[in-house]
Amino acid sequence: MEKTLFSLPSPLPEGAVLIGPASWPTPELGNSASFFHFTDPEKALQWLIQSSLQNQPPISRLIFLHQDAFAGEGGGDRLCLWLENLTGLNQPCLPILLHADLSANHLVRFFRVGLFDAMWVPLERPAWVNMLIRAEKKLEYRHQSRLILENTGETRETLLNLRRKIENDTARTTSELLHSQESLQAANQQLAAAMDELSLLYRFGRQLSTARNWDAVLRGLLKSLGDFVGSGGAALVLRSAQGGSYSPRQTWQWEESSWDKVLVNLQDQVNDAMAETMMAPGVFSISPDQENKPGAGPRIIALPLEHQEIRLGFLLLLFGTPAERDSASNKFLPFLQTIQVMLSEEIASAQMLDRIRYIGKFNAQVLETVKSAIWVIDENGHTIYCNRAGQELLTGQAAPSEPSEEFLFQIGRGRLEKPASPDRDELPELFLDALLQLDEVEGLLLPTLRKASAGIFRGEGAVLRSDGRRIPVLAQTTLMAGRGQGVNWLVVVCEDLRDSRKLEIQRLRADQLEGLVEMSATLAHEIRNPLMGLSAQAELLAEQLPPQDKRSRYIEVITGEVDRINETITRMLNFVRPYEPSRSTVCVARLAMDSVELVRPRADEKSVGLVLDFDDPTTDSPGAGHWEFDIDGGQIKQVLLNLMINAIDAAPAGSVVSLSLRRCENLHLVDTFSGTQTSSGGLMLLVTDQGTGFGEGGPGKIFRPFYTTKSSGTGLGLSICQKIVRAHGGEIRAERQQNQTVFQVLLPQVLPEGEVIQKSQKEQA
């Protein structure tokens, strides 16, 4: 460790004690006798004990503890014992720990046994100066406490002298006896008041330092404090954050309907009129409001709570009259100042602990929500931490739901040391059970990863799950500082590659399908030319045969098959060819009625009923304009005909096929280019039949090209329908609802170009 890391800035307090390595005092301090240096903490403690036993006034000392003074196994326990022994001395000593890498849990433990402050090195001068200021305030607080104790001793001596005087002067007059009794009563009251103050201070400090929830403690503290000083109400006002607004944290017998006004007046009177309202350093007397009322005056004692020149809030005591406030301030001012310092320190410490807990909780929640599996492995290969994704990757089962606070205390303590649940013992180990395999690593995996350059590795491999499955992963590792000097842990992050590889397979399939479509278009072009020749030759043969010749029927079969092949090729070309709708204002209701009439003969032939469900466009409400949309009428008509013909072919005899038209204010559509969901008004067309459904393929396959469930079909009809609907910015969906098959065509409302221009002009006007 560099010598300059633990350098102490100037000024160095008079009589300071330095406990640390022999080379610690920096050269700039020289051989000054203003401080004392010890390399052995026990020798320093014995020297302090001897100093406290000497008959001389107590000396206030600042003791600076070097981190290495308690290094080694059990260093934290030795430091705690050393601090406990230090607190028993008569001299007011403030131990300050200089450290570089201690955790928050260690620091909290040291603070609880008597550590005054802990400072990270290297030391910055502002932090050094702030520490000296807080130390001065702390020593002043102890000086006040010592004065109270000395007054108590003097009072006891006075009582003894009075008793001796009474015994020796039994012959004195009755008036002198009464006077002595009055003096004794006053001394007893003074002693009782001092003991009550000490008892209350001790109880407040004890409750604040040990309480987990301050709500009940603060209310009890305000009540006890108000009763003790004779206040009619009390309130603790704190800031939510540095630079934030003030708000009451807890009140007692102070029901204020307009706290905002009180707080504004409080800040104005404290900040703008400090010279007039200051009662003592850091204590102010203010009015509840700034209005001039009969008999009004400063009835509130305001004690600003500050830490390191940052105002945390106020402690407010409300009295009935200014006279009551003056009486309480004259009697309890030192006591209130002590309460002020104690509350400031405790609130600052509590806020710091809250921030530490919040950061830990935040990190735990982040680690538990990421999709990548994360492990922290110690030097022996044991799992220190494993997040939810890692547990699910190892076991193939959902990880147990646990509060984030539990994860906070598991991190860094070892999973196998204190399991959070009975099932956690059964969680397999990533390295000890050899569940991680990397393609680029041969031999022992853990030593190889730890010896990698800076502990950083990236490569593909697999995780062998407990059910025997092999999960492909992309593994990344790095080293992090563990607990203890020179301890390094290994962080392993594994990304599940199953989804990415599925997407790659789907992309390859899409590329193959695209090639198949291009090949189909080429074949269609090459096949159509010979078909035209076959059709022409068949027509020539038909003209040369006599009308009654039986061979004419063979010619009809040839021409019919040629027409069927040509129709199939036309469908293929329509599917491959790019399509751009030719929009115009169309009455969709009329379009639907025409479509129903065109397929009615086919429905009658199969004994299937047809139902058209929509508002009558000939009535006054909603009117014919209710169904006017800007679409390609011919193409949408083709979609309706195709869906209705498929429904009629699938419907059993005696059933009904229905076509429904619905206007919708909010159509939830997915943009196929960006993948985002949009919502807009539009039209919904529903075609419903009572057929058997989609077969084994399900609704996910029926829109694929060349997929069909019919014995004689090309499998391009629904693909072309989907292409037309998407060109209109809509969607076509298929699903089973109870025993019915429902096709939904969703078309967003698109205004004609003229209406868009008119609307834009109106908005500009």
Image (cartoon, grey):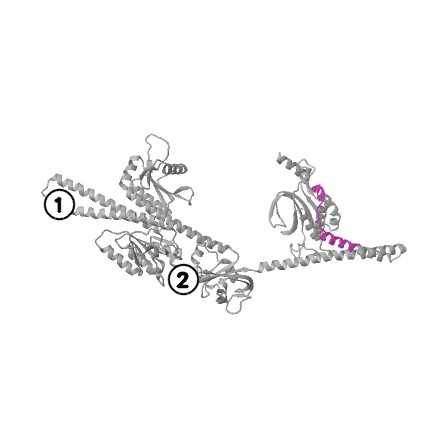
Q: Amino acid at mark 2?
A: Gln
Q: State the residue in front, 551 or 191.
A: 191
Magenta stretch, main secondary structure, is helix
Q: Which is nearer the eye, 234 or 58?
A: 58
Q: Secondary structure at mark 2?
A: loop
Please give the range of residues in magenta. 563-592
Task: Tell me the residue that label 2 is attached to.
Answer: 485
Residue furthest bottom in the image: 443
Q: Residue furthest left?
A: 171
Pointer 2 or 1: first along the chain? 1
Whether residue 213 is visible to the viewer of this picture, yes or no, is no
From what the image shows, is residue 309 above or below residue 715?
Answer: above
Q: CA distance from mark 2 to mark 1?
A: 68 Å
Residue 301 pos. (x, y %): 33, 39
Q: Amino acid at mark 1?
A: Lys
Residue at x-position 42% and y-position 52%: 357
Q: Residue 554: which disc?
A: none
577 in magenta: yes
Q: Quadrant of the C terminus?
A: top right
Q: Which one is nearer the viewer's eye here, 17 or 108?
A: 17
Looking at the picture, tell me which residue is in the foreground, 202 or 46. 46
Image depth: mark 2 or mark 1 in front: 2
- The reply, left or right, for residue 97 in relation to residue 556 is left
How many callouts does the rendering have? 2
Badge 2 density bin: few <14, some 14–19, many ≥20, Cα 10 Å: few
Residue behind mark 1: 165
Question: From the viewer's perspective, is 60 left or right of 437?
Answer: left
